[in-house]
Amino acid sequence: MSEKIYIGVDLGGTAVKVGICNEEGQLLHTYEGPTEVDKGADTIVANIEKYVRRVVEESPFAWEQVAGVGAGVAGFTNVREGIIILAPNVGLKDFPIREILEQRLGKPIKIDNDANVAALGEAWGGAGKGIENCVCYTLGTGVGGGIIMNGKIYQGFSGMAGELGHMSVVPDLEAIGCGCGQMGCLETVSSATGIIRMAKDAVARGDRTSLSHVENIMAKDVFDAAKAGDEAAIRIVNRAAFYLGKSMAAVAVVLNPELFIVGGGVSKAGDILFNEVRSVFAKLTPEPVQRGMQIVPATLGNDAGMVGAAGLFLRS
Ligand SMILES: [Zn+2]
């Protein structure tokens, strides 16, 4: 067995997920264990080492076949230096994770932030398989993004490219403040948080909606109500979809990607969201630009982080 394998680490605040990929971006074997953030940096890296060694032990592969270990981290990373600048959920700051893991594992290490890594995962082994240029949105608590150009993550000047959630898309009069300090970001309307906020506003305004009977409104409640024909819920979903489609129209004329991939919890809404996004995109994008471009759901779900982290060796 001389086939090379690549290990992807998805380092999150509660769990570390580790997966083995082959050179085609197929996820072959996984292992998951607690991060133990409360025990500090030494324990976190010891855990990563333990889980990486464990996933190989439990697989049919030999340690010698491991060509590299990539890690995706929720937070700001310095990709060139291999440093976690700030990862609040993991409690790490100015942490030279590449050097430390290289010493512990004796393998080449690469890191990137979780949104870029998830985008690469979808582009390499998921919805964008075989496609060189795609842009990925992750609609969760916030809106994350990643740009894959010519098969590789596009980092930009200081690694801040692909912050799609902070595109300013909402007009001033309707704009509200975003966690980033700006106003009217896509994240304020098209994230789960934004959808829940709009639903609570509708209820508080006294709009006639079935959501007024829901105690603790979640984004899924809004989508379920919209599917059942609730007009207030439909307006909210259409608003989230409108700004997502509007942002894609802006990205389309700048980057001309072949594919927009949409993942994250909100994307599970399915057709009710996607149909509206596609229709807005078609309306707002010049015809020659949008020709052949597609908007599709992500396919890897929570595995995208592991796959993309493994892909850092072949696709970054
Ligand atoms: Zn913002």
Image: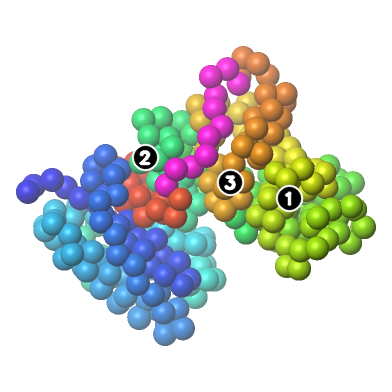
Residue 258: image location, x then y, percent? 50, 26
Say if residue 91 shows up in the picture: yes
Q: In this figure, which residue is indicated by the disc labeled 2? A: 124
Residue 256: image location, x then y, percent? 55, 26
Question: Is 246 above or below relative to 79?
Answer: above
> Residue 9 occupies which quadrant of the picture?
bottom left
Question: Is 216 above or below relative to 262?
Answer: below
Q: Is mark 2 within 8 Å of ligand 1?
A: no
Amino acid identity at mark 2: Trp
Q: Secondary structure at mark 3?
A: helix
Q: In this figure, which residue is indicated by the disc labeled 1? A: 225
Closer to the N terminus: mark 2 or mark 3?
2
Q: Nearer the viewer, residue 139 or 200?
A: 200
Q: Nearer the viewer, mark 2 or mark 1?
A: 1
Residue visible at 61% across and 37% down? 271
Residue visible at 73% across and 50% down? 225
Amino acid identity at mark 3: Ser
Q: Nearer the viewer, mark 2 or mark 3?
A: 3
Q: Residues within 10 Å of mark 3 (few under 14, many from 20)?
A: many
- Residue range in magenta is 290-300
Q: Which mark is residue 267?
A: 3
Q: Nearer the viewer, mark 1 or mark 3?
A: 1
Q: Residues within 10 Å of mark 2 (few under 14, many from 20)?
A: many
Residue visible at 58% across and 17% down? 291
